[in-house]
Amino acid sequence: MASEREVRVRLRRAGQEHLLRFWAELAPGPRAALLAELAPLEPEALREHCRRAAAACALPPGPSPDLAARLRPLPPERVGSVGRSDPETRRCWEEEGFRQIALNKVAVLLLAGGQGTRLGVAYPKGMYRVGLPSGKTLYQLQAERIRRVEQLAGERRGTRCTVPWYIMTSEFTLGPTAEFFKEHDFFHLDPANVVMFEQRMLPAVTFDGKAILERKDKVAMAPDGNGGLYCALADHQILEDMERRGVEFVHVYCVDNILVRLADPAFIGFCVLRGADCGAKVVEKAYPEEPVGVVCQVDGVPQVVEYSEISPETARLRASDGGLLYNAGNICNHFFTRGFLQMVTRKCEPLLKPHVAVKKVPYVDEEGNLVKPLKPNGIKMEKFVFDVFQFAKNFVAFEVLREEEFSPLKNADPASRDSPCTARQALLAQHYRWALQAGARFLDTHGAWLPQPPSPPLHGDPPAICEISPLVSYSGEGLEVYLQGQQFQSPLILDEDQAKPCTEDEAGETSWPGLFPWCCCSRVQCLC
Ligand code: UTP
């Protein structure tokens, strides 16, 4: 381990010697911890990091003046659309996706290194329960979707197959995530097929370019953004692991989208049939000012342009069909070939420009007091996972229906959007629609019929509570056998063991606070 003297010399070269200003007061344990944290920081890289952070932050925010002239929507031939394609085309995409999954060529990769500051819980977001009747966490829903898609692909091709699950974590999320998976027996996945790895951390920096001490013996570090993926893949030889398993196609996604379709066969199949090396799922923007990045072209090169970079006039432009010209909202659901990821990690990663996030970063002041700032005081530099689109040789976008595939959890209740409440509603509304489509009918507590298609709800609480386990249905398929022609009273919980009649003790015993008791005998004509 480097000595204090060596570290001090290196910090001086980086202009960051203040990080040792409480050295004399520290006991041996904290001294060792601080040295261990500082020793890996290369002086030149640290100096450059701090300089870039301060310089980037000094630039005026807002739309880039010359962007409008350089911006174009993606050409239509690069875009596939679930909503605008015929059933036969969708079936072909799906079949191809299932074929690749059955050949063990598809992996999923979860970006789970974020700190989830807006949600504000002290544990990784994937462990969050949005309040579903089943009490499932985001991680559990995702694990069950993997199991189901493996099963569907296997059944179609008469084989057993595996979709390995790669999980990028950070210093904040690795320990609790690993522990949580162990506690839950990896949700019945084979632990050998769940690979967790850690992304790098970077110091948070003041507006004048000084790394921040969050304690006398600890630098304020933050994960290097979800675009830290590319360094992390190289650091932990993840692409080599994929190669050993024969994985050729990777579906990368964010932890917080409760509706995410892991290894979505339609998306995978579309990208593979188009020969794409890189692809992005998109949803139609809900309104011009919606704060989502737009997948488009700048100077002919595919990119995600942040909403803050686009002027309101450009955001409001209409296409000839009346829709928004820039309507491809990025939902952080990406397709990459392993070859593309290899090329990016070997050659292109250093070309990715970090983005500036201005945050409130707790720090120790000159006197050594801990300060929790009320206003943003620090800069975190993050790379973004989608910034590699520019390197694609054959980039495609795949437009999906928002109500079926996108409802992110970003904010704490009672926020009006992207909250636990909206995520729960989105999932339950989807399951209610699936149940109706499969031929179920629901009664309210007074025995009256509840709304039927063609107008099942897209937003807000559905008329009846219906939760369907991903182990029973991945995207609405196969439900007729349980639901066709049957009547149910809310709430209906359709789980893997639904077919089993419940015991008298179980019936009505479990309840979801504020709602009805539930069990499989919520069927009006109960089998029990
Ligand atoms: P967000 O940008 O929403 O960040 O991440 P966040 O950390 O979840 O939440 P806030 O902004 O602090 O409230 C989008 C996705 O990228 C992952 C997150 O875990 C989430 O899946 N991510 C983000 C990383 O994997 N690493 C990072 O350094 C940042």
Image: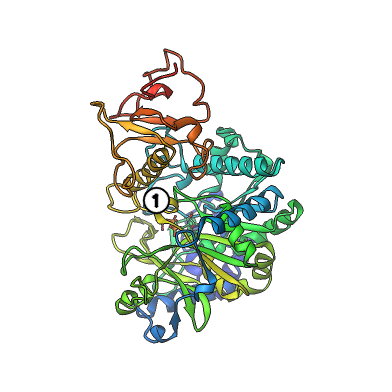
Residue occupying the far right of the picture:
244
For mark 1, give the secondary structure. Answer: loop
Residue receiving disc 1: 409
In the image, residue 518 sits, relative to residue 129, either above or below, namely above
In the image, residue 262 sits, relative to residue 51, either above or below, namely above
Q: Quadrant of residue 343?
A: bottom right
Q: Position of residue 497 (x, y in %)?
A: 52, 26
Q: Quadrant of residue 182?
A: top right
Whether residue 431 is visible here, answered yes or no, is yes
Residue at the location (54% across, 39% down)? 144
Crowdedness near tag 1: few (<14), some (14–19) or many (≥20) residues, C-alpha within 10 Å: many
Residue closest to the eye, 437 or 114 = 437
Its colouring scheme is rainbow
Residue occupying the far left of the picture:
446
Q: Position of residue 486 (x, y in %)?
A: 40, 28
* Amino acid of disc 1: Leu
